[in-house]
Amino acid sequence: MPIRFADISWPAARRYWLVNARVPLCLLDDKLASVSAGDGEGVTGVDLLIEDGNLARVECAGADRDQTTARVDVGGRQVWPTLVDLHAHLDKGHTVERSPNVDGTFHQARLAA
């Protein structure tokens, strides 16, 4: 039976490995991606070293690890970086002169449109 996400025990340690993780090959550097076979979905197994809440290292899955560092088995789940919604409203560019936001508030910006 697969590990339920709710049942994963997250360590309090500042340094631990996420093991049995899967990531898209397109998110890996060329060196690691070249040695990873990937599957039909373009995803490969990796182990991720987390230090102080940040990704410190990515290694091929199952490599010999320091057994003193905590390990968290994520059960083959995909791990992605934080998704950020970077976008621009091209129809709003260069409109300051035509539609000024007098007081700089959100409400005024909506009215200026």
Image (cartoon, rainbow, N blue to C red):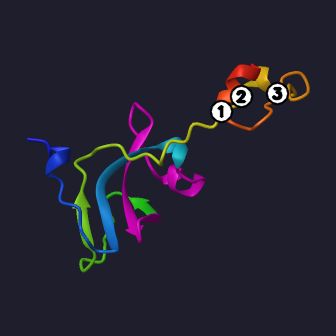
Q: Quadrant of residue 11?
A: bottom left
The amino acid on which the numbered mark 2 sits, given as a three-letter code, is Ala
The amino acid on which the numbered mark 1 sits, given as a three-letter code, is Phe
Q: Quadrant of the C terminus?
A: top right
- Please tell me whether residue 38 belongs to the stretch shown in magenta: yes
Tell whether 77 sits left or right of 5.
right
Task: Please name the residue that numbered disc 3 is placed on.
Answer: 93
**Residue 109 circle label:** 2
Work out whether 64 lies above or below 88. below
The residue sitting at the right extreme is 97
Depth check: give the residue in front, 34 or 14: 14
Q: Quadrant of residue 87?
A: top right
- Please tell me whether residue 86 belongs to the stretch shown in magenta: no
The residue sitting at the bottom extreme is 68
Q: Position of residue 86 (x, y in %)?
A: 63, 37
Question: For numbered disc 3, what is the local secondary structure?
Answer: loop
Magenta part of the protein: which range? 28-57
Contact (Cβ within 8 Å) of mark 2 with mark 1:
yes
